[in-house]
Amino acid sequence: MADLDIPIIDLEPLTHGAAGGLETVAAKIGKAARETGFFYVTNHGVDPALIEQVFAAAHQLFALPTDAKMVLTKDFFRTNRGYVPMKGENLDPSKPSDLKEAFNIGLDLESDDPRILAGEPFRAINQWPDLPGWKQTVLGYFNAVWALGRTMHRAVASDLGTDPEFFEDKLDAPMATLRLLHYPPQPAVAEEGQIGAGTHTDYGNITILLPDSVGGLEVRRRDGVWLKAPTIEGAFVCNIGDCLMRWTNDVYVSTPHRVVNSSGLERYSIAFFLDPNPDAEVACLPSCLGAGETAKYAPISGSDYLKSKLDASYEPVKAAGNGGNQTD
């Protein structure tokens, strides 16, 4: 069972449209978002067979020879798409590079898509490995968790005292990233402070994480205590990102977390980062201002906000020929 400080929320009342279901789930997500910033969700509606298939796809990809994976690194810094090699990122610049490899996709667009031709921020062509059926499986999963994220945002909006549909037109063409991750066992000869993923917060609105049974995710409570977040069968681990924290004037909390794979086993996880549309205005919701309070942050577009976060993450490691990103 998970630490009691990380609640488990049953989404069935929301996903099945039960009477009062939206309000019930909204209150639970809102409480978790204000306290730990992390929560598990069950009865989320994502097909267990699809979950099994996407894990198999991750194993298949990372088992490829290094040369075959490196072909998929084209323009990564510019597009945030494709393969990131082992130790290719550094989430905590004060520590050595992370012990993981990763693969990113976003919305799947054709090269002649008007958004790409117009140079719209964070629109790019996905890189795909030459593996039969692989693209279809991964895109199917992308679409399933994207739909889940939008459903959960109805509860978020309700909890924040606004129209449940408030986020819908801000998430219908998002800068979302699906990231497949592979962590080797923590080696005895690792550099001091080197772990699977350094301490960080996520950049977007909500992260929907699918970990395998190995575990390794750790969450830092507001009092500084680190909580282990073990895998719960059939559940996703969700957390609030920096962008949603900004939208709520820090009413919701984006919580630092890390990955320490001390299991002695290979660890795989699949993270979906739901960032808003590039042109979405990220501005304080009126309901998140108390009497006499002012917004802590100026309004900013979704694309400018994400760029500011990625630039801060990438720069320390680009100089060393590596990259940076959010990860779980």
Image (cartoon, rainbow, N blue to C red):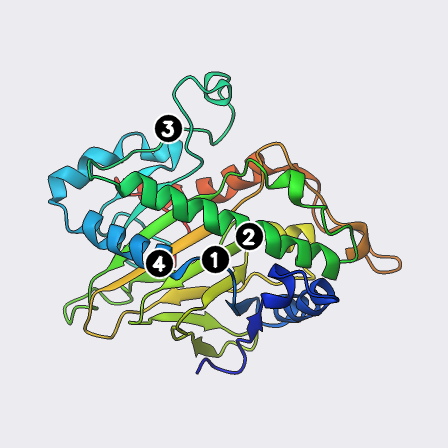
- Which residue corresponds to mark 4? 49
Q: Residue at x 39, y 32 (%)?
A: 79
Q: Dot 2, how many residues are within 10 Å of its Cα: few (below 14), some (14-19), or many (20+)?
A: many
Q: Which of the image's four quarters has the C terminus?
A: bottom left
Label 1 vs label 4: CA separation?
Answer: 17 Å
Badge 3 is on which residue?
A: 125
- Above or below 168: residue 296: below
Q: Earlier in the sequence, mark 1 or mark 2?
A: 2
Residue, disc 1: 208
Q: CA distance from mark 2 to mark 4?
A: 19 Å
Image position, residue 239 (x, y; %)? 52, 62
The mark that comes first in sequence, 3 or 4, is: 4
Q: Which residue extends farthest right? A: 291
Where 314 sits versus 23, above or below?
above
Can you tell which mark lies on residue 149? 2
Q: x, y (%) of residue 273?
A: 47, 50
